[in-house]
Image (cartoon, helix red, strand yellow):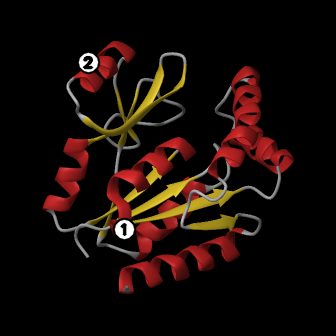
Amino acid sequence: MSGKVIIFSAPSGAGKSTVVGHLLKLHPEFEFSISATSRAPRGSERDGVEYYFISADRFRELIAEDAFVEHEEVYHDRFYGTLKSEVSRIWAKGHVIIFDVDVKGGVNLKKYFGDAALSILILPPSIEVLEQRLRGRGTDSEDAIRERVGKAASEISFAKGRFDREIVNDRLEDTFAEAERIVDEFLCA
């Protein structure tokens, strides 16, 4: 199974991190790819665990050094990306890489890894439900919530038809079951 990649993407708040966490518990051969970001940590996030937190200036230097598989400036001076060194680190252990990335990152990763990758888009039942979930987190300011909700519709429109599979996360138990089935099919292929 080494050399395989599973990509989960969604608008912020749709539940992709919850689904990824569930799958990581079921599959010891999976390893989470830690993305790099120039944003500040939220809540209890720690450097090298949820993300590699680096400055926007350092992120630009790494882009110039061709250190990323993919990267995106999601908002002004707020970068996200996948370091090539992270991919090498996980594959060296013989593990399957599991990604939890934004929609554009997911599309770019699928292009980069091709048939070695399974890309899954997690969708909220509606934009209104997405906004409720973001508010329920209690980690973002009102401005950040408005910004994320505003971005979600364009992300969903951009993503349609660009992923191998789509799952609407309405009931979490159903979402888990569908994700497990899709991933198992991919691993057995």
**106 relative to 87 in the view: left or right:** right
Per the image, label 2 sits on a secondary structure element best described as helix
Q: Quadrant of residue 37?
A: top left
Q: Quadrant of the N terminus?
A: bottom left
Q: Which mark is residue 162?
A: none
List the single residue furthest toward the top. 57
Instruction: Name the one closer to the observer, 6 or 161.
Output: 161
Q: Amino acid at mark 2?
A: Glu
Kindly indicate whether the residue at mark 2 contacts the one at mark 1 (C-beta within 8 angstroms). Answer: no
Residue 77 coordinates in the image, percent (x, y): 48, 16
Query: Considering only vertical position in the picture, is 152 above or below 171?
Result: above
Is residue 40 visible to the viewer in this orientation of the structure? no
Residue matched to label 1: 115
Per the image, label 1 sits on a secondary structure element best described as helix
Rounded to the nearest angstrom, the CA distance separating label 1 from label 2 is 30 Å
Residue matched to label 2: 61
Query: Considering only vertical position in the picture, is 141 above or below 135?
Result: above
Q: Amino acid at mark 1?
A: Asp
**30 relative to 40 in the view: left or right:** left
Is residue 89 visible to the viewer in this orientation of the structure? yes
Residue 2 coordinates in the image, percent (x, y): 22, 71
Q: How many marks?
A: 2
Residue 64 coordinates in the image, percent (x, y): 25, 21
Q: Quadrant of residue 138?
A: top right
Instruction: Name the one closer to the observer, 59 or 145.
Output: 59
